[in-house]
Image (cartoon, rainbow, N blue to C red):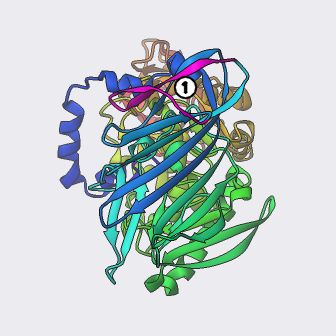
């Protein structure tokens, strides 16, 4: 999820949010040197491939201060003696140590450039350690904005979490902060005041009492993971676990909730099981069996932190008790459990190389909600939910953002992206084939990073339909296509598409009775349509499943 809540709040509280959101979209976007340093893959970043991190951090809650280190274990992909890593400039780099010696570095905005005493040759495995400290950015509206969420529970005990998608993991720990390079494995060590627990990604390896009134929790992640997914969650937690019998065998499922909410865990158990049942059916086996599946209660609403999903929906169905689709189907399940868990497949298993393609994460995960409904309540309910989500679409700008500047596209990547995928399902018109494509995506791109072209090429190949221009129009342009129907001077019924995309073409389902639908291939020039009528007024277009405009001449 990229700021799941941002778009859904627009959908649910339209009159409050759409005005301010529109003003933001009208503002001229100016990308700075700092944006390019963060978003561009320069030779100083591509010269090394991250293999392993050991993040070791102490959290001083009273002073909202963190200190610690991060070990970078990497493999050189070219010869180099200088590289870039990332850490927000409000956090100080105390030193960088290489082979036991302090080495020089310099900073530019949130980028740090390290100089090594000798050339590190291509193929070599090597490492360095960054020591750092400071007061990290405080998130004022997590997870809409990123940083530390410093809260207390109802008993006044500290309740702290991180959420940093989009803003970047370097807001609180040093790393190579680009989505294209996922670390292969990681150890996350977090020291917290005695009496509190830290829950992070992966599996708990060890709990160690320290001498200074702190306890350290060591969590090991064995699967590749994106930086923004790394999280700490500090609180007075109760822990309950169970086993889910999944496609790959037993999967450990853990629930970490505030002790005061332990009696509400049955709500999470029900929703977690229903979610895993539905998504293993549609998308294939849960991608991180080795690291387990956890729901961790947070003060903020939610985030897809891999194998440690943040949950803050207050143990209720819907999105804070509401249904963005307006159909009622969204009130039958806990939105945060379903949506954020859907990201384990799309966002965590399959990750976009560049933030510009965040639509890959959000479109498929928005659509996963409809597939959850399909699995448990049937296809008609699923289609109704997808159609209902249209009310949140703004068509303000393309869903795909600009490359190389750490910028995503329109928030339409949620509802419009889900509606697009429902339309692709309708075009393919073979649900077994569609399911095979969704499962195949997660198998073919298992634990990989991808681009726009990777997803599109796979879809084209496996469906046998060329969706190039469909994706270009809906993802890279702002408007939706318009189907123009006419009867020409010879009495022939004809159709064509009007769209921003040159030579746009897309199949569409037409009918005379609204029940028996036929699929027709339509391009950007008028072609004859064979229906038992010559009067366009008799033609019905499947606008329930096709998100298009219609013009009848």
| Nearer-the-camera pick, 402 or 81 | 81
Q: Residue at x 52, y 60 (%)?
A: 190
**Element carrying mark 1:** strand
Q: Position of residue 165 (x, y in %)?
A: 43, 45
Q: Residue at x 48, y 59 (%)?
A: 232
Residue 407, picture quadrant: top left
Q: Residue at x 70, y 51 (%)?
A: 222
Q: Is residue 2 left or right of residue 247?
A: left
Question: Does the magenta segment cover residue 112?
Answer: yes
Q: Position of residue 549 (x, y in %)?
A: 38, 32
Asked if residue 455 shows in the view, the reply is yes
10 Å neighbourhood of mark 1: few (<14), some, or many (≥20)?
many
**Image quadrant where one finds the C terminus:** top left
Magenta stretch, overall SS = strand
Residue annotated with mark 1: 506
Q: Is residue 453 above or below residue 97?
A: above
Question: Does the magenta segment cover residue 429?
Answer: no
Q: Is residue 299 above or below residue 404?
A: below
Q: Position of residue 90 (x, y in %)?
A: 30, 41
| Number of numbered callouts drawn | 1
Q: Is residue 551 left or right of residue 194?
A: left
Which residue in the rendered view is the most extreme toward the front? 101
Q: Which residue range is magenta in the image?
A: 100-121
């Amino acid at each position: 999820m990229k700021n799941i809540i941002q778009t859904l709040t627009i959908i649910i509280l339209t009159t409050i949010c759409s005005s301010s959101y529109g003003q933001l979209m009208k503002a001229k976007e100016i990308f700075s040197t700092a944006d390019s340093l963060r978003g561009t893959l320069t030779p100083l970043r591509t010269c090394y491939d991250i293999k392993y991190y050991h993040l070791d951090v102490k959290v001083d809650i009273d002073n909202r201060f963190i200190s610690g280190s991060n070990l970078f274990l990497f493999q050189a992909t070219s010869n180099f003696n200088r590289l870039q890593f990332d850490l927000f400039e409000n956090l100080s780099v105390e030193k960088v140590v290489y082979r036991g010696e302090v080495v020089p570095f310099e900073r530019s905005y949130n980028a740090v450039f390290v100089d090594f005493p000798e050339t590190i040759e291509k193929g070599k495995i090597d490492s360095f350690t960054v020591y750092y400290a400071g007061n990290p950015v405080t998130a004022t509206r997590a997870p809409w904005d990123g940083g530390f969420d410093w809260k207390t529970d109802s008993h006044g005990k500290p309740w702290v979490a991180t959420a940093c998608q989009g803003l970047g993991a370097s807001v609180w720990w040093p790393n190579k902060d680009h989505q294209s390079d996922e670390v292969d494995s990681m150890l996350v060590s977090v020291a917290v005041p005695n009496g509190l627990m830290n829950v992070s990604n992966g599996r708990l390896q060890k709990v160690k009492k320290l001498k200074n009134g702190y306890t350290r929790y060591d969590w090991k992640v064995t699967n590749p993971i994106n930086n923004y997914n790394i999280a700490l969650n500090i609180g007075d937690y109760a822990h309950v676990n169970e086993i889910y019998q999944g496609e790959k065998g037993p999967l450990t499922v853990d629930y970490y909730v505030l002790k005061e909410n332990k009696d509400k865990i049955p709500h999470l158990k029900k929703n977690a099981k229903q979610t895993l049942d539905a998504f293993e059916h549609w998308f294939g086996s849960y991608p991180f069996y080795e690291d387990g599946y956890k729901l961790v209660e947070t003060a903020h609403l939610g985030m897809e932190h891999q194998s440690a999903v943040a949950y803050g929906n207050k143990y209720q169905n819907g999105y804070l008790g509401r249904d963005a689709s307006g159909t009622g189907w969204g009130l039958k399940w806990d939105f945060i459990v379903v949506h954020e868990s859907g990201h384990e497949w799309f966002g965590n298993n399959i990750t976009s190389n560049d933030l510009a393609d965040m639509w890959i994460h959000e479109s498929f995960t928005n659509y996963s909600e409809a597939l959850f409904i399909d699995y448990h309540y049937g296809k008609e309910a699923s289609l109704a939910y997808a159609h209902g989500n249209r009310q949140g679409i703004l068509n303000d700008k393309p869903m795909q953002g600009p490359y190389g500047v750490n910028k995503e596209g329109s928030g339409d990547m949620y509802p419009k992206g889900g509606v697009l995928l429902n339309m692709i399902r309708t075009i393919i018109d073979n649900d077994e084939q569609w399911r095979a494509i969704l499962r195949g995506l997660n198998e073919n791109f298992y634990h990989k990073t991808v681009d726009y072209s990777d997803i599109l090429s796979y879809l084209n190949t496996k469906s046998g339909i060329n969706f190039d221009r469909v994706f270009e129009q809906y993802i890279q342009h702002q408007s939706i296509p318009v189907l123009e129907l006419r009867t020409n001077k010879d009495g022939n019924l004809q159709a064509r598409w009007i769209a921003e995309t040159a030579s746009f073409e897309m199949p569409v389902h037409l009918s005379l009775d609204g029940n028996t639908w036929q699929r027709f291939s339509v391009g950007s020039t008028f072609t004859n349509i064979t229906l038992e009528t010559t009067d366009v007024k008799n033609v019905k277009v499947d606008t329930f499943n096709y998100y298009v405009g219609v013009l009848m001449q």
